[in-house]
Image (tube, grey):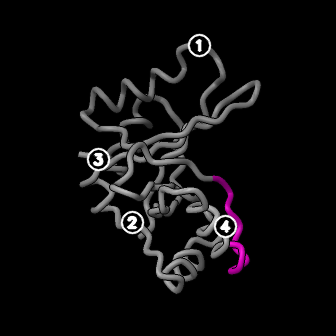
Amino acid sequence: MKLKQLSLFLENKPARLKTPCKALADAGINILTLSLADTQQFGILRLLVEDWEKGKRVLEEAGCVVNVTEVVAVEVEDRPGGLASLLDVIEQAGINIEYMYAFTFGRGDKAVMIFRFDAPDAAIEALQQSGINPVQSVTLYERSR
């Protein structure tokens, strides 16, 4: 239920984002979703790709320093208060959200959010006990096609 996310530090200068994107494209690896956060000197590019091991290898061969982290994809009711309800479950379990971002598509009346929890296994357990099931990687990748 946990997904492998690729994280890269990029210098905050023009055209630095192109290197990893082109390397993945040239290798035929599709970016399923991404997040880019910045500071004055650098940015952190976080990527979900279908074949994370190949993606990591390709990016490293292109000169990128890649860190692999575990994230959890969760379906959220696409309605006012949907995210707040999910956050109630996480708060009651005492779990910290380090960051989150939206997946690039939803399904019907649900949106998909990507979460980096400080305790992903505990978060998954708390969500499941509340009737919320994290999205399996196979399901997530099938939806992106």
Where is mark 1, residue-wise? Answer: 14
Residue 136 left/right relative to 129:
left
Which x, y percent locates residue 45? 55, 37
Q: Could you say which disc has been placed on residue 118 in the image?
A: 4
Q: Which amino acid does label 2 sit on?
A: Val
Q: Give the x, y percent position of residue 124.
A: 52, 76
The residue positioned farthest toward the right in the image shown: 40
- Relative image position of residue 106 (x, y in whole percent): 38, 51
Q: On the picture, is 127 further left or further right than 23?
A: right
Residues in magenta, as a range = 91-99
Closer to the chain start, of discs 2 and 4, is 4
Nearer the viewer's eye, disc 2 or disc 4?
A: 2
The image quadrant where one finds the C terminus is top left
Mark 1 near mark 3, Cβ–Cβ under 8 Å? no
Earlier residue among tags 1 and 4? 1
> Do the numbered discs 2 and 3 sit on residues whose CB atoms are within 8 Å?
no
Q: Which of marks 1 and 3 is in front?
A: 3
State the residue at coordinates (42%, 47%): 48
Q: Which of marks 1 and 3 is nearer the N terminus?
A: 1
**32 displayed left or right of 117:** left
Is 119 one of the magenta-colored residues?
Answer: no
**Disc 2 on helix, strand or loop?**
loop
